[in-house]
Amino acid sequence: MKHLYKAVLCFTGLILTSSCDYDPLEFNVEKPASVAAQEEIDAYADLKTYVNRATNPGFKLGTGVALSDYNQKGVLYRLINRNYDEITAGNTLKHGAVVQADGSLNLANVKSLLEIADKAGVAVYGHTLASHSNQNATYLKSLIAPTIIPATGPGGGSTGTDVVADFETDNLGKTYPMTSGGSGTVVNDPVAGASGKVLNIVGVQTHPQFTINLTNGRTLGNYESVTIDIYATGSTGLFGQGMRMSINGGTLANFNSPSAYGAPDGAWGRGKIVMQLSNLNLTEAQKKLTSFTIALGSATGSANYYIDNVTMQWKLTDIIVEKTVEEKKTILTDALQRWITGMVSAAKGSVKAWNVVNEPMNDANPTELRTGIGRTLAADEFYWQDYLGKDYGVIAFKIAREKGNATDLLFINDTNLEQNLDKTKGLIEYVNYLESNGAKVDGIGTQMNLNLNTDKQNIATMFQLLAATGKMVRVSGLNVAVGVTTDKATPEQYQAQKEMYQYVVGKYVELVPAKQRYGITVSNSMDASEPIGLWTQGFIRKPAYSGFAEGLSALK
């Protein structure tokens, strides 16, 4: 394309003394191809003008946009309002952005968005009511967390010590039963000048026995250890084979020798010997005992030692009561109903279409629902279906239908349908399940994250399968990646991107009957680090813009 440019040349001397004559000269200048191409793109009208409203009265051309960007009312705001009928505002209407730690709904951003969009004459698409991502998972998990009953013993506290025997109230000469003969006799403290009574153990490999009756509501399982004071010499019990302990005549458990516990030779080792009951490997039945006999002492062939202050240390642990499957189902059903009721009721004055169930199907097992079981989940992930089963979708659609406007359009939406046709079929089967259980699904959304090599035949087949349901079909998030960052993209890649956009829009128009076309939403109109949009970051139309417009022009 050649353009005629005129130039006026006027030559003067060093000192201008008179005006020069007007003498136009003509030059034929070849315009750079890139400039010409851009002028062709810029010659296209605004996108929504390509929608034939007479034959497609309900068609919505939409774009995704962040609330913060749209609310600035800057260039992007004006660009969106000129080119689109509808916006999908990122996470603004999602559970994680609205539901607070106490379960209340903070709708301030929602109301702000709706007010601004209403004034601009742009519709807001409700995205999304029941999803696994962008959830306030912390709150939801707290609802079904186990009930914890704090451990508190009689008189308060969760730890304490019970005295088994200190012999002070026993008469001198009283004997205690032994495990293997010998004697256990109450005597005065052997230390010169000391007062108090103790138990003298004499014999060969024999131990005193104590009968214990717990009347404080605790059981043997609440006790952690047994502590005794010991007075022994090297040859009468300080060394030997170590301490022993058993319950109800069972096998004696082995422990360190008194010396190893730190007991001195020929003096009292007060509180030195602490034997852990866990060494006894108590059975569950034994842990429930409230009456039992405990035997303990030093294993030696020449016992002649003293013990005092036999005590048992207890610790109560919190009682954890897990909620049953049915309890969790009831609790989360109520939570889902309250969330959807609150959101739909607040937005129904402006929002006339909702993505009710989002991304339900499992990519690896496309006939099954997604699940979080067996996976490490992100902080905002929560799978309603893991607790409510397939009926989580039924519940969501019924509540959205009940609380919204009578004419609202309710959609189910998923990703990668064009990449996995079995997933498309699985989603359709799930729609059939929902409707067989009383839900009414108006349409199916397909979020299309494409690249330059996406199988075009799969795209066509997907549209055919969705159209065959008789439901409305919505392209809920279209983008075409070129495989490189913006700074590395080539003209050839941009041309291929244009062709893919044009192909998708054209096939949608060709294969989805007019009465079933809800519309097409691009994921993001503007390029970012990756050039997926129709405009550059500098608001310059790309070849993709013209391809998209050409596809829309097929709407008859």
Image (cartoon, helix red, strand yellow):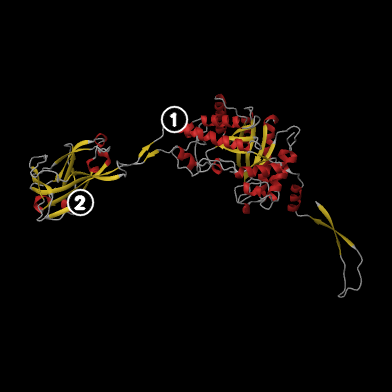
- Residue 427: which disc? none
Q: Amino acid at mark 2?
A: Gly
- Judged left or right of residue 409, residue 157 is left
Residue for badge 2: 271
Residue 337: x, y in percent? 54, 33
The answer to the question of whether label 1 and label 2 lie on touching residues, with beta carbons closer than 8 A, is: no
Front residue of this view, candidates 68 and 419: 68
Q: Amino acid at mark 1?
A: Glu
Q: Position of residue 415 (x, y in %)?
A: 57, 38
Q: Residue 235's x, y, as percent?
A: 9, 52
Residue at the spot of label 1: 326
User: Alpha-carbon neighbours of circle 2 within 10 Å: few (<14), some, or many (≥20)?
Assistant: some
Q: Secondary structure at mark 2?
A: strand
Q: Describe residue 224's horizontal placement relative to residue 529 as left or right.
A: left
Q: Residue at x 49, y 34 (%)?
A: 332
Q: Choose between 528 and 381: the one closer to the eye.
A: 381
Res 64 visible = no
Judged from the image, the secondary structure of the residue bearing numbered disc 1 is helix
- Depth check, front residue: 227 or 388: 227
Task: Give the CA distance from mark 1 to mark 2.
Answer: 50 Å
Image quadrant in which the C terminus is located: top right
Q: Is residue 406 above or below residue 224?
A: above
* Residue at the image position 74 percent from the left and 32 percent from the top: 55
